[in-house]
Image (cartoon, rainbow, N blue to C red):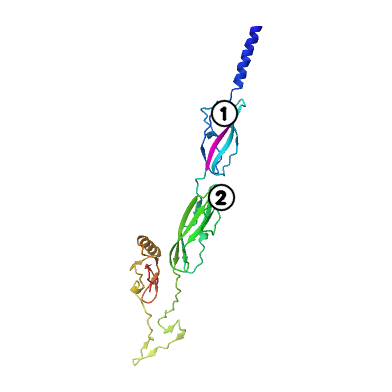
Amino acid sequence: MKKMSVLAAYVMMILVIGCSKELKVTVKDNLEVEYGDKLDNSILFDKEQSDEGVTVKEVKNFDAKKTGEQEIIVVFSDSDEKTKEETIKVSVKDTKKPVIKLKKEKVEITAGDKFDAASNIESVKDPVDGDLKKSEDKKLTKNGYIITSDVNAKKVGSYTVKVTAYDVNGNKAESSYKVTVKKKPQETTTQNNDQSSGSGYTSNQGSYNKPSTGNKGSNKKPTQSKPQTCKAGKINPNRIGNSGKLFNSEREALDYGNKMDANDSSILNFIYPQVYDDCGTLLNKWTVHFMYEGESSQVK
């Protein structure tokens, strides 16, 4: 009986020692977490180097919306409900820039039209914090966006609008779009010079001209003045811009102007008006006129 008691005591001692053994957890330190992201508990410890069945029971003092280094307390546990607390250093970093969405990459208006640079902005958002608001503060560096523009809506030419956005942590994003101010089309009046034939009746005058009788008794139609005619495509050289070129479309003229403007730093600006013929009729032709220092911006 005495030997049995000693054996039982020995077994009990082993069980007590086994149960009181501290939970082994190998934690990972100096971790980096993206701003706004949910903490992934699996990265807090090395599963292979820890006791079997270890899981994260609780995380204290972690703030995903606070950048910088944080000391968090993690409570680990196993299937036997043994627990262990560890302090781990975590660094929260915001690496995501705001996102600027534009409605169009290029905007065209007519000289004299009202222009609102913000009207072409679809949205300005931070991936975590959402919408950013427009600011008039040109020195803004956080939490908003500003617009810079050189558009002169009264002057024909090509301009740029720039949008600069900052999130709450100072991440910066930029986007821009082109604005083309076109020449205002001139109104033209067309006179009706059509005349009916045969009876001497002129439709645009509403009167009847009696045919004259000559010596031979023959009837003659009244003499009609012929309208001035201009050959199609005959261009007054004074109405061609200093580029000396003609284009069949407004787009061709604009592209040529932009190309030359990009290659020649002495060009201050350019316009691309339509061309008239010698009779003053507006033709389906365009030219390009470059403006240099001290030169006129008008095409004669």
Can I make out residue 105 in this image?
Answer: no
For the point 63% across and 15% down, the residue is 12
Q: Nearer the viewer, residue 107 or 24?
A: 24
Which class describes the residues within 10 Å of circle 2: few (<14), some (14-19), or many (20+)? few
> Along the polypeptide, which appears first: circle 2 or circle 1?
1
Q: Looking at the picture, does residue 33 appear above or below residue 25?
A: below
Residue 215: horizontal and vertical position, in percent?
34, 93
Q: Amino acid at mark 2?
A: Gly
For the point 35% across and 74% down, the residue is 238
Q: Nearer the viewer, residue 273 or 47?
A: 47
Q: Which residues are magenta?
A: 84-92
For the point 47% across and 55% down, the residue is 175
Report whether 206 appears left or right of 244: right
For the point 59% across and 20% down, the residue is 18
Residue 130 is tagged as 2
Q: Which residue is mark 1?
A: 54
